[in-house]
Each structure stands twice: as C-alpha cells, then as structure tokens.
Image (spheres, rainbow, N blue to C red):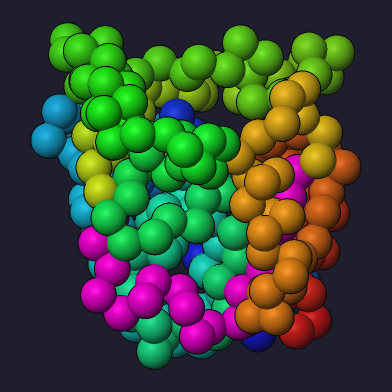
Amino acid sequence: MACFVLVHGAWHGGWCWRDVRTILRDNGHEVFTPTLTGLGERSHLMSPEIDMNTHIQDIVNVIAWEEMSDVILVGHSYGGNVITGVADRVKDRLRHVVYLDAFVPEDGESPASGMMKILNPEVTDAEIEANIATRRAAADELGGSHTHYTNLFDIPEDRPELYDWVKRRITTHPVRAQVSPIRLSNGGSDGLPRTYILCTERPDRTAFMVLAEQLKTDPGWTSRELATGHDAMVTMPEETAALLLEAAGD
C-alpha cells in the first residue's frame, strides 16, 4: 500500500482530486487531498497575509500529524511550487515526487517570476517587478486574484458535468502566494525520484511545455504526457491515476 498526498493548484481545492482519489483508494492505497489555506472549503480563511510558506507548511503539517513516510507527493500547476518546498523540508519522508503540468521552481523564484523566466529567458528584473506590482495592485481589496482562465482550465463546455462542477468551486487565490519567492535550503526535490506529467492539449504554448521539454533530457526525471487540458485530474482521472500508480511502482 502506498501513501499519496495530492496537492491542488491555484483557485482549486482538495475537491478537484475527487475521481483520482477514488481510483487510488479502490486500488488499496491511502490518499490525502488537503486544501491549502484560503481556498476551497477553507476560503473563509482568505487573507492578504497568506504566502507560499503558508501553503508549504499546510502540507508539511499534514505529513507530520498523520505520521506519514514513504509518501508519493503530487502537485498540480501552482502545487508544484508547494511540493518542491515540502520536499525541501521533509525529503526523508518522501518516496517519489510527481509534477502534474506544474511548476518546478528554483530557489528565490515565485510562481509569477518563474513563469515569466520560462517563457522569456531574457526577461529583466524590472519587468518581473512591474508584473508583480500589477498583480498586487489588482488584489488590494480581496487579497487574491480571480482566475484569468476564460476557458476554465481547458475543461470543454460540452462536458457540463465537469465544467459546471469546477466553475462552482473555484475561488480566489492569495496573491502573496503567487508573488512570494520560495526559499530552498536542501535542493527542493533534487535527489528524489521524480516524474513530470505534461498536459498537451492546450490552446497556447505554456510554460509547462517549455519546462517539460527541458526535463526530457534530464536522467533524473521520468517524463509522461496526457492528451488533455490543464485539469487532467478532472478530465482524465483514470489516466492520471494510472500514471500516479506507475510512480508508486504499481
């Protein structure tokens, strides 16, 4: 039996893993799908003070309080930042780290700066600072930013049972968590078995596509793809679960 901890991305909550969680549990595994502070059913805790460190500590505490070891740690999208920070702190408790269409940040990067650097390696510090200032200004009143995905994370509208389900549940996301830099003192997830799963059916070229191309040549990574939009755990739960089971050695 493996122990999975599935970490959602921005604007989501633990709810988004519903179908994947069921499949993994039906295969006899233990599965945790915590919701990060300020999102999902914890949206009542939204605060301008929530930053990346808050979300990293959310997951570190779940692992510690549940006394987990040999964990398969999975992060989707923004959750890649979170699981990298978690791995940096509790590396000895992890078996495998899986990035699902997710960021793999370096020390000192934020989600905002990381995306800009991946898409444009020539971006200047001044341009990054201007982008971050714009994000902060837009979120002054709410302490978070509404989704900018007009296509709702690539979920097709002709699948209303999924589209409407996700649309009802997305929330604001704390802006400080998007712009605060991650601090890694132990190499993040370096040294652990790692898998990168790229979602290939996107309307535009994404930072995750660029990142996946870079990692394909790295012997420290296993590369996989899913022919679906960004929210693979919603649109392709069976296929997503199969890749997570592969990472667990099933």
Query: In which quadrant will I find the C terminus?
Result: bottom right
| Residue 149 visible in the displayed image | yes
Determine the residue positioned at 53% across, 83% down. 192
Residue 34 falls left or right of residue 21 = left
Q: Which span is picked out in magenta?
A: 182-199
Q: Quadrant of residue 90?
A: bottom left
Determine the residue positioned at 82% across, 54% down. 225
- Residue 205: x and y in percent read 71, 31
Q: Nearer the viewer, residue 83 or 131?
A: 131
Q: Quadrant of residue 67?
A: bottom left
Residue 159 in the image: above or below residue 66:
above
- Residue 201: x and y in percent read 82, 33
Query: In which quadrant will I find the N terminus?
Result: bottom right
> Was residue 169 drawn as part of the magenta stretch in this picture?
no
Classified by dominant secondary structure, the portion drawn in magenta counts as loop
Residue 9 falls left or right of residue 38 = right
- Residue 106: x and y in percent read 39, 60
> Was residue 193 drawn as part of the magenta stretch in this picture?
yes
Determine the residue positioned at 64% across, 80% down. 220
